[in-house]
Image: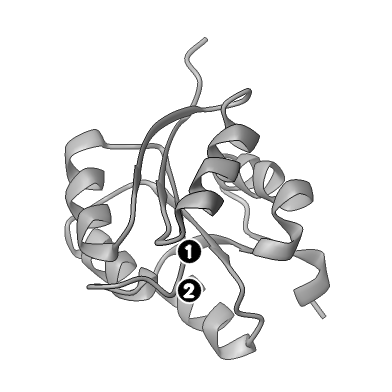
Amino acid sequence: MQRPRVLLADDHHPLLDRVVSLLKAHFEVVGAVNDGEALVSEARRLQPDVIVLDITMPVLTGIEAAQELQKAGSTAKLIFLTVHQNAEFIRQCFAEGGAGYVTKSRMVSDLTKAINEALSNRRFVSPSLSS
């Protein structure tokens, strides 16, 4: 059985390395980029099943990149992995097609779960934010 293909986007290189280490046992990590514009380009080229992206990135923010991906007809599930815990950010991410919202502080416990929920067409929000 083919493993789901995941593309990563974050401007913090050490975090990308940690995410790859966390996900590689369960998913095929097909790429990692450092800004929103590169994310849109690589998503078009690689056609991943899931995109894990930060909100705060250079060139295009994660939310702007999500808008561009929707315009381009991307079917990838979007999981926002971020430090932001503001309800307005959560609302914006889901309004732009997000399937999951995970805080970086809960990445180890929540990210794989969020991806699996998204692949089952269910939304996920880190439990610390769902109140």
Tell me which amino acid carries mark 1: Gly
Name the residue at 53% across, 50% down. Answer: 14
Disc 2 target residue: 93
Determine if residue 125 is in view.
Answer: no
Distance of mark 1 from mark 2, alpha carbons? 5 Å
Image coordinates of residue 21 in percent, x first then y, are 60, 33
Asked whether, in this view, residue 48 is left or right of residue 116, the answer is: left
Which residue corresponds to the image point at 22% horizontal and 66% vertical from the top-left?
68
Nearest to the observer: residue 70 or residue 128: 128
Disc 1 packing (10 Å; few <14; some 14–19; many ≥20):
many
Placement of 101 over or under 117, stated as above or below: below
Question: Do the numbered discs 1 and 2 sit on residues whose CB atoms are within 8 Å?
Answer: yes
The residue at which mark 1 appears reads as 98
- In the rendering, at what x and y percent does residue 56 appear? 43, 75
Residue that protrudes farthest toward the top in the picture: 1
Relative side of 52 to 127, left or right: left
